[in-house]
Amino acid sequence: AQSVTQPDIHITVSEGASLELRCNYSYGATPYLFWYVQSPGQGLQLLLKYFSGDTLVQGIKGFEAEFKRSQSSFNLRKPSVHWSDAAEYFCAVGLYSSASKIIFGSGTRLSIRP
Amino acid sequence: DAGVTQSPTHLIKTRGQQVTLRCSPKSGHDTVSWYQQALGQGPQFIFQYYEEEERQRGNFPDRFSGHQFPNYSSELNVNALLLGDSALYLCASSPGLAELYNEQFFGPGTRLTVL
């Protein structure tokens, strides 16, 4: 069965420091991969997505993610975090056979230390 | 553009009751999907509506039903509420029959508490 694992429940980084959020997936074919961010009281916002091609994907708000097939990973990175990046981050995999039926990981809560 | 809107924002019900949640999609979008997000979890796909028909469904019981209106707005109905139905219910809209490359836009959600 398809699944998404985010091993870090909560991460705290200092403002200006680099960030990497981990995501591992289990899927039998080439997956469609997504990262979403959810701020309190707000809906999910798409940061970036990977369908095919270049394995390094650029997204909004200065985020990027790298697809590594050999490791079944799609980690999210940002070189320098800002206090406004504090939020919940969700990795998700889209099912090739079921458009829009996205499976989400359980999320990583990011806190920013001043 | 108002984006995806949902109502109400919060709702408190008791076990056994029925609830209806509402969603208005982003302008120009005709596909609506519903997700349930339990506390501390990622969203789970409930079902998707397009052209007023349920097109796809996740692993949810028949107590969960929906409807899409000609103006593309949608309702989620849950009958015989259980304590475990307490969650944030998210609506997402997209253009066309929601191919994955069509970005889904999410609303802020409705927080349902079942006592």
Image (cartoon, grey):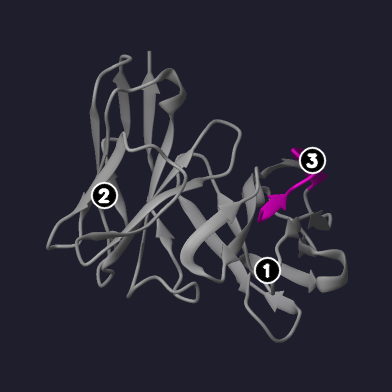
Query: Could you say which is closer to the camera, residue A4 or residue A88?
Result: A4
Disc 3 to disc 1: CB gap under 8 Å = no
Q: Answer few, some or many: residues within 10 Å of disc 2's Cα (few below 14, many 20 plus, some between 14 and 19).
A: many
Q: Can you give x and y, in whole percent of width and height, for residue A85 in the image?
A: 65, 51
Q: Which residue is mark 1?
A: A62
Left or right: residue A50 compared with residue B78: right
Q: Answer few, some or many: residues within 10 Å of disc 1's Cα (few below 14, many 20 plus, some between 14 and 19).
A: few
Residue B26: which quarter of the image?
bottom left
Q: Can you give x and y, in whole percent of width and height, for residue B83 in the image?
A: 43, 18
Q: In the rendered image of this protein, does residue A100 appear above or below residue B81?
A: below
Query: Could you say which is closer to the camera, residue A62 or residue A88?
Result: A88
Q: Could you say whether the residue bearing mark 3 is in a helix, strand or loop?
A: strand
Number of the front mark, 1 or 2: 2
Q: Which residues are magenta?
A: A1-14
Q: Which residue is mark 2?
A: B23
Evaluate whether residue A107 shows in this view: yes
Evaluate whether residue B108 shows in this view: no
Q: Amino acid at mark 3?
A: Thr
The residue that appears at 61% across and 69% down in the rendered structure is A48
The residue that appears at 48% across and 66% down in the rendered structure is A98
Q: Are marks 3 and 1 on the same chain?
A: yes
The residue that appears at 74% across and 56% down in the rendered structure is A81
Left or right: residue A100 compared with residue A2: left
Q: Which residue is mark 3?
A: A12
Q: In the rendered image of this protein, does residue B111 appear above or below residue B26?
A: above
Q: CA distance from mark 3 to mark 2?
A: 34 Å
